[in-house]
Image: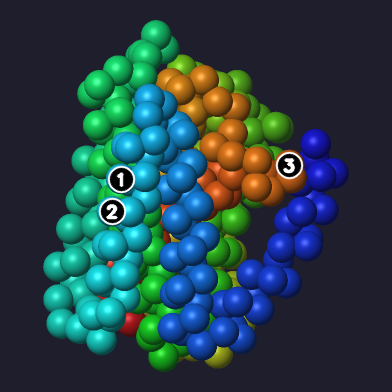
Amino acid sequence: MLKQRVLTAVLLLPLVMAAIFALPPKWLIVLLALILLKGSAEYARLASFSGRFTHYLLLELQLVILIVLFIYREYWGDHIVAVLSACSIAWLLMFTRLFLYRADDKPGKFYRLAAFSTAIVSITSGWFAISWLRMQTDGAWLILLLLLIVWAADTGAYFAGRRFGKSKLAPQISPGKTRAGLYGGLILAPLVALLAVYLMPIEKINTLPLILLSLVTVLVSVGGDLLISMHKRTSGFKDSGNLLPGHGGVLDRLDSLLAAAPFFALGLLVAGF
């Protein structure tokens, strides 16, 4: 399984970098929307919708929202702080579901309604934040910085968890996650961010704001991962999908990024970047 995961990642990495740096912003935004619509379909699966109507309603509503936002993308900057703040607050509200989860939870009406709302908010807010980042002057580099922080958090968590992991972080939701893993991600991510900003041809971000931004990004990325894990555990699925060999579906790979993107983008604005 690990070999398959590594092989898939090695094959995907050049494609991801090419999409970020070679595609014009408009086409990257469109490509990301198409990918995330597949994520919406996975949300419908995890929500355990009983009929096709709700499944298609979710996809159609998500598509309409993305199209409308895309059409009016030139006006995003008018109220960008307010919009990104609203996205971040919405994620914090969704995170409260993690504290309400119980091991014997079943996909009832409330769960399906909450999953439907979570799907719309998470896909829309994540897509919006990443798209806004790409539209900035150094947008491609900023997206890469975001990815490096999220990847560093995952890498730090993996190795610290294997070496020191004893105390579970959220045993009912994701038994594999440990507190040591979280600390490992919180240590490695700021170091990677500092080195990346030093090497990147972008306007420099002061050290303290960058460290704080990295720490917040790591914490919410873990929350995004746990949120999808909660849906998978409730609905009884191991993965959100089977699109990527060894990695699962779109949500399995992008759950952390979707949560992190609005906070990261807002943090850059607050830091005066």
The residue at the point 82 percent across, 53 percent down is: 7
The residue at the point 54 percent across, 64 percent down is: 147
Spatial CA span between label 2 and label 1: 6 Å
Image: 195 above or below 187: below
The quarter of the picture where the N terminus appears is top right
Q: Is residue 184 visible?
A: no
Image: 169 above or below 184: above
Which residue in the structure is indicated by mark 2? 61
Image: 177 above or below 41: above
Q: Element under label 2?
A: helix
Which numbered marker is on residue 57? 1
Which numbered marker is on residue 177? none
Of the residues tagged 2 and 3, which is closer to the observer? 2
Q: Position of residue 165 (x, y in %)?
A: 62, 27
N-terminal of the two: label 2 or label 3? 2
Spatial CA span between label 2 and label 3: 30 Å
- Residue 93 lies in what quarter of the image? top left
Q: Nearer the viewer, residue 60 or 245?
A: 60
Q: Element under label 1?
A: helix
- Residue 130 lies in what quarter of the image? bottom left
The residue at the point 41 percent across, 12 percent down is: 103
Q: Are marks 2 and 1 in contact (CB under 8 Å)?
A: yes
Which numbered marker is on residue 246? 3
Q: Amino acid at mark 3?
A: Gly
Seen as rendered, the residue at the extreme top is 104
Q: Position of residue 258 (x, y in %)?
A: 42, 55
Spatial CA span between label 3 and label 1: 30 Å
Q: Amino acid at mark 2?
A: Leu
Seen as rendered, the residue at the extreme right is 3
Q: Amino acid at mark 1?
A: Leu
Answer few, some or many: residues within 10 Å of disc 1's Cα (few below 14, many 20 plus, some between 14 and 19): few
